[in-house]
Image (spheres, rainbow, N blue to C red):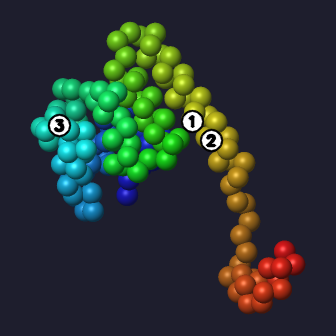
Amino acid sequence: MTNSVFEADHYRTYLKQRLAVTGTSRGLRSRLAEKIRTQPAFISMVLSGDNDLSPEHIPPTNELLGHSPEEAHYFTLLVFQARAGTKELREYFQLQLTEILSKRTEFLNRVQMKDTLKLSDQTLYYSRWYYLAIH
């Protein structure tokens, strides 16, 4: 349903998707506005590109969206990149974001399971306690 923050190239794109007005996420815009102590109109302005989140808005937003520490760090960098006033600063944040993504991809490639047990083998394995003890 919702993409990971790691798949976003801009925090605004990510927020638009997470704060969609359909399904179970209904009312998230209002809750976010309440959480960061602002009006819902400000959230609409952020999503439309007329405004940006401030650094003070980042921790409550991370909390509301249930970000892990890694997701919170990445989201913070996305906001800082969007707010950067110079090309050099934007490039600096982009370099950090790219580094995080490459480390994450490398890690996910290493831990990716290649083989899984067939259902019949799983049934046999979990049927007796001593199979687990031997393993």
In space, the residues marked 2 and 3 are separated at their CA atoms by 36 Å
Asked whether 57 or 1 is in front, the reply is: 57
Q: Residue at x 68, y 82 (%)?
A: 119
**Residue at image mark 2:** 105
Q: Residues within 10 Å of mark 1 (few under 14, many from 20)?
A: some
Q: Secondary structure at mark 1?
A: helix
Q: Please name the amino acid that badge 3 sits on.
A: Thr
**Earlier-in-chain disc, 2 versus 3:** 3
Q: Position of residue 99 (x, y in %)?
A: 59, 29
Front label number (1 vs 3): 3
Residue kind at label 2, given as amino acid type: Thr
Q: Quadrant of residue 128?
A: bottom right
Closer to the chain start, of discs 1 and 3, is 3
Q: Is residue 26 above or below residue 91?
A: below
Q: Secondary structure at mark 2?
A: helix
Query: Would you call the spot at circle 3 few (<14 residues within 10 Å), some (14-19), or many (20 or more)?
Result: few
Q: Is residue 30 visible?
A: yes
Residue at the spot 71% in from the left edge and 78% down from the top edge: 118
74 lies above or below 52: below
Left or right of 45, for residue 12: right
Circles 1 and 3, Cβ within 8 Å, touching? The answer is no
Q: Residue at x 52, y 29 (%)?
A: 97
Residue lying at 57% horizontally and 35% vertically, measured from the top left = 101
Q: Residue furthest bottom?
A: 127
Q: For marks 1 and 3, give the CA distance.
A: 32 Å
| Residue 29 coordinates in the image, percent (x, y) | 21, 47
Q: Quadrant of the C terminus?
A: bottom right
Task: Give the labeled residue for mark 3.
Answer: 38
Total numbered labels: 3
Distance CA(mark 1)–CA(mark 2): 6 Å
Check contact, mark 1 vs mark 2: CB within 8 A: yes
